[in-house]
Image (cartoon, grey):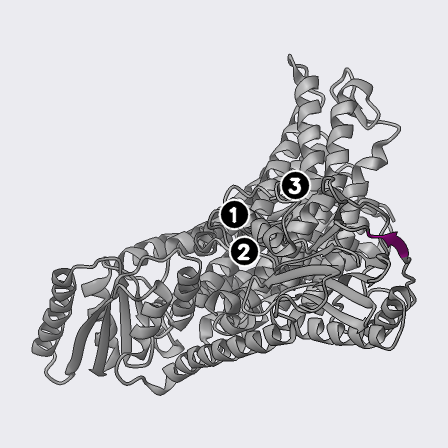
Amino acid sequence: MTIIGESIVSCYADMTSFLVMLLLLILAERLHKRQNESMKILFHLSQCITLVCVFSFICHAAYKQTAPAWHTIVFICQTLRIYLCFWILINWIAYVVSKLFGPEKRRPRVFLLVFAPFMIYTVLLAVNLFTGIVFTYNADNQFEAGVLYTIMVVTELIYFIGTAVICRYYDRKSSKIRFLNITPVIISVVLAYSVSLFTPYQIDVLGFVTGVTLLYFSMASEFRFVDEESGLYNRGYLAYLFDLAMAGKNNLRSALIIDAEGSLPPVFKILEEALYSSGDVIRADKWRFLLFSRTDSIATLQYLASLVSEGVERHNAEHPEDQVRITVHSRMQTTEENSFEFLRGVMNDRETGNEMRDIVSMISELDRLDEELKLAADIQLSILPMVFPPFPERTEFDLYASMTPAKEVGGDFYDFFLIDSDHLALVIADVSGKGIPAALFMMVSKTMIKNQLMSGCDPSTALERVNAQLSERNSSMMFVTVWLAVIEISTGRGRACNAGHENPMFCPAGGEFEVLKYKHNVALGISKKAKYTMREFELHPGDCIFVYTDGAPEATNNDTEMFGEKRLVSTLGRNRDAQPKEIILHVADAVREFADGAPQFDDLTMLCVKYFGK
Amino acid sequence: MSIGTAGSLIMDTASLFFMTGILNYTELYRKRGRLDDRLYFSMVIVNIIMTLADALAYFLERRQMSLVRETIMASNMVFFASFAYFGYLLMLYLDYRVYRDKGRLRKLRIPAFIPFLLLFVLLLINLKTGWLYTIADDATYQIGPLNNLIFVPAAMYFAAAEMLSFKINFRLGALGALIVISRIFWGFISRDISSTSLTYTLFLVCIHLHAMNAPMIEGMTREKETVEGTI
């Protein structure tokens, strides 16, 4: 079977529509779980459209297919398709009405009259199966519309546009329905129907689908931030404000904290009318509302509070049987607070309702995590050798190292220790990622490497064994780059391995720092059976080795320019005759100066050793 | 107007509708300005550019006007460049969604950019050599001997993106695979109708719906970036 002519376009449109509706039905599950009536109707609408896509595809695919079986199949599919289009329209009207007039019992009776034409059309469709008064298919399986079909289509369009007019009217009267949310649906359906009427390409289903998808988008963004009962902003919006505060995009300076008692609908109305132009009123709790503002004027806040009080007085005077009470107090951001702390302070102000406790306890949890992280940072730093000079009695060499984490805990580490009286081990490493997971992996790796070297392994064997252990149960897929060397102190002869780490820098006595470039092996934790090449070298008195992690060359300034390897070499060159401590401190200063206040994104670790010989 | 042209224009218009909707209804997320938000909207913009270039190329096909061949040539160049660049952004976006590590992204973005760069250079060379495609005298698109190379960078990016989307959520990954399979299926129905921009649009719709339906308050403690920013 081959799809013929213009029906290819129609089939494309149907398949696309089906795929989009499938995405909607699967991914918008959380929206669908809301039990309100309008969402249920929209879900039925989506299901109807999905079915229409299938029937429509069959009808278009069967275009000009002459096999007799197709004639029956396509006639039935077309009938079901038209019938489902009625249901789509009925659901659409029901959706608009439910948004305007609320639960079923308040729906106006006129809605029942809307059903009448569609009941007639349903009967006509049933009669059409035997008489062909609405549509038929000719011998070539081509659709032929009767006069009644055109009348049906025009009726549907009129009803559809009619809902737009009603929405526009009510949009002006209340905020229950937004005309802007409905407009794309109307435009896409009218456009698609127009193309279908005046061209050979039948894409009316695509029009429905596009419109409904845009409606979902608008609802999704609306639902995320709007409290259904009050129409004000919800606690999700508070979380959004926290996000903005942390990103530094928030300049809220003051807040009104509003506590209400009594009947809620007048409270919503009073707050909306009094404060609608002053900012976003957030329903933080069943009876507590917040208004954040950029103003730092007490007079402005007092004025806003007076508007609320006047609204309450007016309402209580007009409705003595339905009294409400609203108390308002204000809070200003202090100079010691940043935006995040200010927002948190507002929510902690006075007694909070039960429903706010989850937000407050979450913030307390963040405070506790803060304390634990600081403790973890102290523990991590304590396991790195920090005493310099580490071996004051050894005059054959001098070394210095530093590790500056980007966050409280880091993934870089260095280590140095005497394996025996004549062998010095040097290690520098960089764990993938940052934060607590990297810190834990770092501590495990460091311990393993030291154990292997202390047991007498050469660098290559040590790395292979550590790699095998790290790769074995590495579900977190972390890895660590390592540069490791063991130097025989009496002779200056050394052996080094590089597992994916940055190239070391070497300065011969009286010479210049240069990058030692050679092929590296793979980092630890990636491939269980990786082998590590050992390279031998010999240090002479006055030679210096400088190793580092990528936090140095990849330090970035506010113009997103990187420090780079060349700049690092030139910085080292300016201090090539200095002692390791001066070299490292000088590099750290140069990086800090280059960054010029830009946040440090990666840990910065350096180790420098100078060999003097016996 | 041929069926291919009409169909392509219809698909492109539908894409533009979706893109306009996404831009319109997600203003709050653009204001927030997080890295994943910025990457997502870069993808939306690139897709809009690609769609417009595609629509222009199809619209001008077989028309006899001055500079029409040059315009179609340029439109196709923009289309193919956007075609690969979208994949690059999608891969970076999903990588950030999985790892939430700006440092990692910074290390990744330059090597990941190389396939796109090579394609761009090829597209420039193609202006002289016609290895990838040419525009005939009757203003129709003609495939060149190396035409398949155009799709290699995008295929690599999408393969990486697909693996990453499975890491975020199995359902998201499966739906992404479904979109790719349906694209291949459409190709069997008709090769004349361009559905690339619509395919990309479906990816964006998929990601947007998935993000929309993620719990909001939980995100404050769940997301590494947020925790780090707080602490």
Name the residue that disc number 2 marks: A600
Distance between mark 1 and mark 3 Cα atoms:
20 Å
Q: Quadrant of residue A97?
A: bottom left
x 43%, y 52%: residue:
B31
Amino acid under disc 1 = Ala
Q: Which residues are magenta?
A: A535-539
Q: Residues within 10 Å of mark 2 (few under 14, many from 20)?
A: some
Q: Is residue A121 above or below residue A592?
A: below
Q: Identify the residue shown where x is 71% and y is 73%.
A: A441
Give the label, 3 or 2, closer to the camera: 3
Relative horizontal placement of residue A433, taking residue B34 as reference (left or right)? right
Chain of the residue under label 1: A
Q: Earlier in the sequence, mark 3 or mark 2?
A: 3
SS at badge 1: helix
Distance in Å between CA atoms under marks 2 and 1: 8 Å
**Does residue A424 appear to the left or right of A174 in the view shown?**
right
Residue underneath mark 1: A595
Q: CA distance from mark 3 to mark 2?
A: 24 Å
Residue A113 visible from this viewpoint: no
1 and 3 marks in contact (CB < 8 Å) = no
Q: Is residue A374 visible?
A: yes
Question: Hey, what amino acid is under mark 2?
Answer: Gln
- Say which chain tag 3 marks: A
Q: Residue furthest bottom?
A: A354
- Residue under numbered circle 3: A573
Q: Where's residue A75, x and y in %? A: 73, 57
Indicate the position of residue B179 as horizontal and vertical percent values: 73, 55
